[in-house]
Amino acid sequence: MHETAVIDHPAAIGQGTKIWHFSHVLKNSQIGENCTIGQNVAIGPEVSVGDNCKIQNNVSIYKGVTLEQGVFCGPSTVFTNVYNPRAEIRKMDQVRPTRVRQGATIGANATVICGVTIGRYAFIGAGAVVTRDVPDHALSFGNPARTIGWMCRCGERLDENLHCRACGLGYQHEGQGLRYGAFQQGTENSA
């Protein structure tokens, strides 16, 4: 932890987590193991961050936001927690929960409107504005963000047959998203 970082108590920070300059972890927040918290990051109060997350510079993660394990938040990612805030009216009793599922990536300067879920291994493009749920493995861009393709667990875009040319995994549609491990290098695999 850098000497300029501020940790309010009680807060739980997992082993191996690094917290950089001018960051603030507010009370009752939990940060998992082996996370990297960049410069000028605010987390909390009452926020949960899973193991192995990377939160780049200038990100604020407010009450109501949950990051599961392995989430990447690019520089200046914006999370909201009240849908229709007013400076003169206290609305913290109207916090809408936001969940970012395991392995998801949120690009630099993206905005996540409260009350949504970003699916497992989804990829939100830089500058996107997420206004509704994002399916597992979806590649979403724009304002408002819309699904324009699909991403592999390894972070590469899937081809038109839902196969990854980088690691060999194949996928199948399941609900609104994808299920991985259906095929691997042309053979059945239920990974």
Image: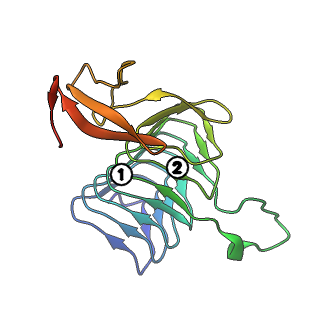
Residue under pointer 2: 59
Identified at 54% across, 44% down, the residue is: 77
Q: Give x and y (percent) for residue 81.
A: 64, 61
Q: Residues within 10 Å of mark 1 (few under 14, many from 20)?
A: many
Q: Give x and y (percent) for residue 39.
A: 44, 48
User: Where 125 falls versus 61 (above or below)?
Assistant: above
Element type at mark 1: loop
Colouring of the image: rainbow
Q: Earlier in the sequence, mark 2 or mark 1?
A: 2
Identified at 53% across, 33% down, the residue is: 140
Do the numbered discs 2 and 1 sit on residues whose CB atoms are within 8 Å? Answer: no
Disc number placed over residue 102 in the picture, else none? 1
In this rendered view, identify the residue nearer to me: 106 or 145: 145
Residue 145 lies left or right of residue 12; in this view the side is: right
Q: Amino acid at mark 2?
A: Val
Q: Give x and y (percent) for residue 120.
A: 39, 47
Q: Where the N terminus falls, by quadrant?
A: bottom left
Q: Amino acid at mark 1?
A: Gln
Place residue 68 in its image quadrant.
bottom left
Q: Residues within 10 Å of mark 2 (few under 14, many from 20)?
A: many
Q: Where the C terminus falls, by quadrant?
A: top left
In this rendered view, identify the residue nearer to me: 73 or 1: 73
Identified at 49% across, 58% down, the residue is: 99
Q: Residue furthest bottom?
A: 10
Residue 68 lies left or right of residue 118; in this view the side is: left
Determine the CA span between mark 2 and mark 1: 18 Å
Element type at mark 2: loop
